């Protein structure tokens, strides 16, 4: 059993959580069922207007998807989370937006369908923070590839039950995780069924 | 001579401009010297907290780079700019951040080096607007490719002098263009020399 097993907390399917992670501590994010995408954001606790940036991270790393050893950087170009371990095949996404009420409206869902965007802002509000925008997220376990004609190809996660990614905080941070409520496409697996996930701060 | 030649205005090298474009009008952006990248943003005039989103555009189009006929969408998923004509080879970028003071610090430049981020916020302020963040830009004529190992590959623009892209406003918008001040890498051509650009609203 993994060393962090005793510290695990659960995020219910379709919901999110804001998790303070002090500099030097690690956040372990567990894909309990293997099929669940988690949108991930990180904010500097000293100044939440500085947050993890996918566009700066791609620029800094000159790669589309961070891997073990890579630091994701903020809008001010400072490392905020470093990938220190990943038991999954390393298929994550930095290209796509968080799902939002407008996307579920496009899908023809009834009003009120939960979304990662809603989860982000609710989770921040629960700890007294806010962000005037929805930053592009780091989509953990989301299987998005760039095809030869520059097309964006979505598929089910390649992770298996219990796979986890470990992220070290490089500054005092708040990490927001959202167990993605997407149940129309196969992004959360062929069963199209959002699942709960787990995390630990170690 | 192009029909818009009499309407052209110039943006000096290293500077930006905020350009109101009413719904249905078109903004023609001319790469006067062929080597100059222009970062491009668009905001809804009715509510500047709604702005053109690269992550929603990639999601909506399922492609990395918009082409003729494609509409770029906002954070609220509404079309804001449609590419109606492009005389260049169509090589533009949606992956990389605007250059910023921190990037020039990384390059070892002296403090005060101009940046696209600075150009965005200065241009908005000149017309009495502001944005609390720096949205990921649509980098016109920027030659960025995704390699087979998901690497981000930067090269000089493929456009030639006088190439232009035509963007139709799908709502009353403010478009900000920044003639990118990058003079360290080859992103603005092998001469590493930022140049002036031109535009017209037709």
Image (tube, coloured by chain):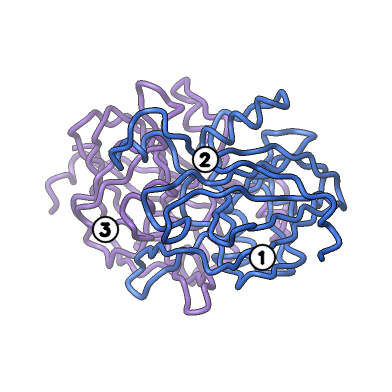
Chain colours: A blue, B purple
Q: Secondary structure at mark 3?
A: loop
Mark 2 surroundings within 10 Å by alpha-carbon count, few (fewer than 14), some (14 through 19), many (20 or more): many
B179, above or below A62, in the image: above
Q: Chain of mark 3?
A: B
Q: Is residue B21 visible?
A: yes
Of the 4 image quadrants, the one containing the N terminus of chain B is bottom left
Q: Measured from the top left, where is residue A65 in percent x and y?
A: 57, 65
Q: Secondary structure at mark 1?
A: strand
Q: Secondary structure at mark 2?
A: helix
Mark 1 surroundings within 10 Å by alpha-carbon count, few (fewer than 14), some (14 through 19), many (20 or more): some
Looking at the image, is mark 1 or mark 2 earlier in the sequence?
A: 2
Q: Is residue B123 left or right of residue B68?
A: right
| Cα gap from disc 1 to disc 3, whole angstroms | 38 Å
Q: Measured from the top left, where is residue A31 in percent x and y?
A: 63, 58
Q: Which residue is mark 2?
A: A116
**CB atoms at circles 1 and 2 under 8 Å apart?**
no
Viewer-side residue, B42 vs A115: A115
Q: Measured from the top left, where is residue A57 in percent x and y?
A: 62, 57
Q: Is residue A21 left or right of residue B174?
A: right
Q: Which residue is mark 3?
A: B67
| Cα gap from disc 3 to disc 2, whole angstroms | 28 Å
Viewer-side residue, A192 vs B148: A192
Please name which of the two marks, 1 or 3, marks the residue nearer to the observer.
1
Q: Residue at x 42, y 41 (%)?
A: B41
Q: Chain of mark 2?
A: A
Q: Establish whether labels 3 and 2 are both on one chain.
A: no
Q: Which residue is mark 1?
A: A163
A169, above or below A71, in the image: above
Q: Is residue B133 left or right of residue A108?
A: right
Q: Residue at x 57, y 39 (%)?
A: B118
């Amino acid at each position: 059993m993994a060393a962090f097993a005793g510290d695990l907390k659960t995020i219910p399917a379709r919901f999110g959580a804001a998790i303070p992670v002090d500099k030097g501590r690690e956040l372990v994010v567990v894909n309990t069922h293997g099929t669940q995408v988690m949108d991930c954001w990180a904010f500097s606790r000293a100044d939440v207007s500085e947050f993890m940036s996918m566009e700066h991270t791609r620029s800094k790393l000159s790669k589309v998807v961070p891997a073990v050893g890579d630091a994701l950087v903020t809008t001010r170009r400072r490392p905020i989370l470093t990938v220190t371990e990943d038991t999954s095949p390393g298929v994550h996404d930095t290209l796509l937006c968080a799902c939002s009420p407008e996307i579920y409206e496009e899908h023809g869902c009834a009003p009120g369908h939960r979304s990662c965007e809603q989860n982000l802002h609710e989770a921040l509000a629960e700890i007294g923070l806010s962000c005037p925008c929805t930053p592009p997220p780091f989509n953990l376990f989301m299987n998005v590839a760039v095809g030869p004609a520059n097309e964006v190809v979505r598929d089910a996660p390649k992770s298996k039950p219990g796979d986890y990614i470990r992220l070290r905080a490089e500054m005092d941070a708040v990490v927001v995780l959202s167990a993605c409520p997407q149940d129309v496409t196969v992004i959360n697996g062929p069963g199209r069924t959002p699942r709960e996930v787990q995390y630990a701060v170690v």
